Image: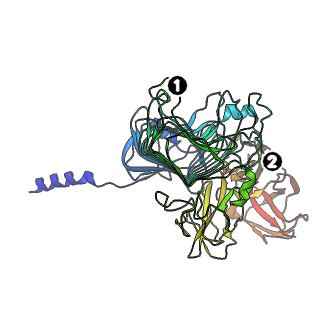
Amino acid sequence: MMKNLLVIIFAIAPFYSWSINYYCDPVNGSMTNPGTQAAPWGSLEAVFNQGTTFNGGDKIILLSGNHGFPKITGVNSSNVEIISHTGHSPIIERIRIGNTAHAAFWLLNGLIIQSENTSQYPINLIDLYSNTNNITVINCTITSNLTTNNWTRNDWRTKANNGVFSRGTGHKFNYNTIKNIAIGLTMSSSNSQFIGNTVQYFTIDGVRGLGDDCAYIGNSILDNVSVYYYSENHYDGFQSYSCCPVGNAIVNNVVIKQNTIINCTDTTRQFRGSMQGIGCFDGMYNNWTIENNVVIVDNWHGITLTGATNCRIVNNTVIDPYDVSYQDPNDPQQFGNVGPAWIKITAHKTDGGIYSGTPSTNNTIMNNLVPTMANDQNIGTVTNNILLGASANYSNFFVNHNAADLQLIATASAIDAGISTGAPAVDIEGTSRPQGNGVDVGAYEYSGCNLSFDIFSSQDTICKGDLVTLTTDALTAASWNNGVVDNVAFSPLSTQTYTATVNDGNCSHSEQVTIVVNPIPVITIIQNGNQLETTTTNGTIQWNLDGNSIVGANDSIYEYTINGNYTVTFVDQNGCEGTSNTITIQGVGFEKSNDNAIQLYPNPTNAIVNIESAERIERIQLFNVSGTLVAEYHQLQPKTVQLPKQNAGVYYLFITTEKGVTSQKIIFTK
């Protein structure tokens, strides 16, 4: 009977699992440690190089430092999460998932993936191979470098890496910031989603959507950086082509909705160009839905499909506010005036491929606001679109097109002018359609009420760990995403866009603000003889003794003369401050006596101190925190000592007795 019971127990046991938190510290950890918080592993790269395996529900928690280039493999039953430790700012240079072995159910949450490239052809900062499935990347910052203010044209061409290259199936990329890159996302994977992300400052394309059954929803694709000549590249906010060879396959079942695509948010910046909006030039494309998008470009191609069947382009707002196109003075090949922007469906290119010249059929173009159209005949249904014409007409439709506010004004002819059948149930902001007697034309549904408001943030750029307060000037209380409470301070873990929504019972309106979170710098002290050294120099250095700043100690090397606990504080170019590990200095060449044998009072003092010692006092030395000798007394026997007057602050008394030396901190008052 007992034997049978044991068999049952062992049969059941494998079905029980417990999730475990593991810690990685590339500065102080070791792969010989068990990976606990008290004894962490080394870098994330080292963990996967060692072939460590995990179970669904486990967390890998990263401490500050450089975690290198982890190559992730392993199939989990549910997500294994890789996340930053609270208050820490780990950096990962790049990540590869899959390739040498299958990888499934990995979650990257709130990480910074940052690396510059120095070759002409960019690497992929996050690279998912075809033998991956169910990978989630959420709330991450993916960038070649957070700071590019001083980048030249050549820097942009040689240092900007690609953000994400996704192959495999079932992946999710949600609420990430992808910036200062070449291509933001290449989605070759199937059954995948790209939702709520910001792609900003890209030198080639914002997004490339190449896989079947994918959704691109609620993203902001902003600011092409034009550093290539026209013969080298044409820039697209969203681009697609079938593969492979290019133009010889079909991309099926893609949804592109509620996105904002803007060529240039700051017309004074360097390297602005003439980006195309949604450009799909090498079909075929089958069963696509493109709806409720705002596209602002300086180009002909607002939304273009060449080789499309059963596709719907519905309730989009496309404008080209540049009647005279920007001319790049450094691109001799750039053609002249481009635009106005159009919506266009035409036949597949005549390129000799298997779909060469195939007509586009059974498509719908409906309820769009756009400067002009350029469709082939017999592409399908084209109805209830309003052609805006030149930018001089925009003020008859939009609240403020110069500020990219393309909500409709009360007198706009687009109100109630659309067709309800086949129109999306909500607009770009989630407002229900219709609000009036009919569906409005364009991406916004006019609600008949004025809920415009501004967001106020205590600061837009912070260091990790700092507090931010967000509030609005709306008359009605706003609700926030991402757990924000109006006018209550919180500490963002990573760069994130926050949305406030106001609803008065009849309609709703949303506004957004992006808070940029810079990492806390990591700084390390090493002891070398009678010197302390730090290799971090690209910022402001301040050495400290027992928590107090040492006056004038601002170099990377400090020669100590006093016992105590030394740290160094470093402020980087973003104004973010980090403090090093502590190194304790004892003895400074002397044998230390018993501290309890000497009592010093009053402390703090205005200069007069009483010293009680069971040992004979031979010498007293007074030092300031910079290590400078202020006063010295020999063969001191009286209990009361009149020290010289000093500025208020921390000083040190070195007391030499017949049995050794002890140091005591003393504080001078005014």
**Cα separation between marks 1 and 2:** 65 Å
Q: Earlier in the sequence, mark 1 or mark 2?
A: 1
* Image quadrant assignment for residue 664: bottom right
How many numbered dots are placed on residues in this image?
2
- Report x, y in % for residue 245: 48, 26
Asked whether, in this view, residue 534 is left or right of residue 288, the answer is right
Q: Does residue 39 show up?
A: no
- Find disc 2 in the rendering and name its residue: 554
Amino acid at pointer 1: Asp
Asked whether, in this view, residue 36 is left or right of residue 384, the answer is left
Q: Does residue 532 show up?
A: yes
Which is more toward the observer, 130 or 273?
273
Which is more toward the observer, 373 or 669?
373
Where is 306 relative to 605, above or below? above
Quadrant of the snapshot with the C terminus: bottom right
> Which element is circle 2 on?
loop
Residue occupying the far right of the picture: 645
- Find disc 1 in the rendering and name its residue: 351
- Report x, y in % for residue 476: 63, 76
Label 1: how many Cα within 10 Å (few below 14, some 14–19, many 20+): few
